[in-house]
């Protein structure tokens, strides 16, 4: 019983859930650039999020919306 259960988990992960990764590994042998498009998209999303966050921090800083008193935060006592 337990052997069948763990073989089922093995089948799920090795033969089903890793299909996209196997395809990506095969694509890398043909074209490095095409295989790394996903990485570049994640990097682009990260840069956009970083610059948006910096813009929002500057906006709050310019409006003086933050209480900068050293005792403003309870964890700084």
Image (cartoon, grey):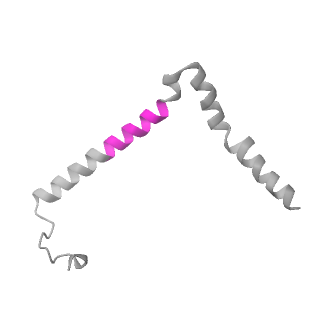
In this picture, is 1 found above or below 40? below
* Magenta highlight on residue 4: no
Quarter of the image with the N terminus is bottom right
x, y percent for residue 42: 43, 39
Q: Is residue 31 left or right of residue 55?
A: right
Q: Is residue 43 left or right of residue 54?
A: right
In the depicted view, which residue is nearer to us: 64 or 13?
13
In this picture, is 34 found above or below 58? above
* Magenta highlight on residue 39: yes
Quarter of the image with the C terminus is bottom left
x, y percent for residue 75: 25, 77
Q: Residue at x 61, y 30 (%)?
A: 25
What secondary structure characterizes most of the magenta part?
helix
Q: How many marks?
A: 0
In the depicted view, which residue is nearer to us: 36 or 49?
36
Write down the region rendered in magenta: 37-49
- Residue that sits furthest to the top in the current view: 30
x, y percent for residue 22: 66, 34
x, y percent for residue 10: 76, 49
Q: Residue at x 32, y 41 (%)?
A: 47
Q: Residue at x 51, y 23 (%)?
A: 32
């Amino acid at each position: 019983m337990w052997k069948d259960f763990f073989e089922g988990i093995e089948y799920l992960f090795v033969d089903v859930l890793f299909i996209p990764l196997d395809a990506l590994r095969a694509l890398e042998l043909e074209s490095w650039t095409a295989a790394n498009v996903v990485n570049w998209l994640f990097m682009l999303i990260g840069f956009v999020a970083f610059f948006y966050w910096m813009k929002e921090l500057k906006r709050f800083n310019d409006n003086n919306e933050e209480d900068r008193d050293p005792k403003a935060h309870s964890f700084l006592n």
